[in-house]
Amino acid sequence: MFALVLSLLLPNLTMASPIKSAPGPDEAPHATASMATNGEFSLELVPAVDWESAEISVAGADAVEVGAHRRGQPLLVEGTTALAAPLRVTVRAALSQEHGVTWVFTVDPDLVLPMRGPRFKKVAARRRGRFGQAKE
């Protein structure tokens, strides 16, 4: 209504729309994560928009500068946290010189067990024999 009244009062005035609107939730990076029981995590982010630079913070840790990335180019962030799942992720990205955006979201990581080798003492004892000599 205001634009209509303004255009009637000032006929030579043209109303311009913004060149680029702010990114919405559909343009947030797609994220997947895995976490070991010892707190080590691996987070993969796939940006939905290009950014000139960005910093990422996971689970309240210090932010990590990741630089420029293109849409669809995967980015891997690894670290350790004492917090249980889900992971809280904060992405601060500069999309251009004049426009920046912050996304805050949670990711439910897939829990994985750390790799465990064979029980070496028992296996080695069986192979050594009674006095440390190799069994045949």
Image (cartoon, rainbow, N blue to C red):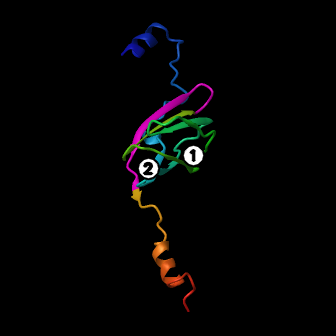
Q: Report if residue 23 lies within the magenta region.
A: no
Q: Residue at x 44, y 40 (%)?
A: 59
Split into 4 quadrants, where in the image is the N terminus?
top left
Against 111, residue 62 (above or below) is above
Residue type at mark 1: give it.
Answer: Arg
Residue type at mark 2: give it.
Answer: Gly
User: Of tags 2 and 1, which is closer to the observer?
Assistant: 2
Q: Report if residue 106 lies within the magenta region.
A: yes
Label 2 and label 1: CA atoms lie apart by 29 Å
Against 12, residue 23 (above or below) is below
Q: Position of residue 103 (x, y in %)?
A: 46, 35
Residue 24 in sight: no
The residue lying furthest to the front in this view is 131
The secondary structure type at the circle numbered 2 is loop
Q: Which residue occupies the foreground of this view, 101 or 34?
A: 34
Q: Residue at x 51, y 24 (%)?
A: 17
Residue bounds of the magenta highlight: 95-110
Of pointers 2 and 1, the one earlier in the residue sequence: 2
Task: Determine which of the numbered discs, if any, sits on residue 71 in the image.
Answer: 1
- Name the residue that disc number 2 marks: 39
Q: Quadrant of residue 49?
A: top right
Disc 1 crowd rating (10 Å Cα; few below 14, some 14-19, many 20+) is few
Split into 4 quadrants, where in the image is the C terminus?
bottom right
Q: Which residue occupies the foreground of this view, 96 or 124?
A: 124
Q: Residue at x 48, y 32 (%)?
A: 102
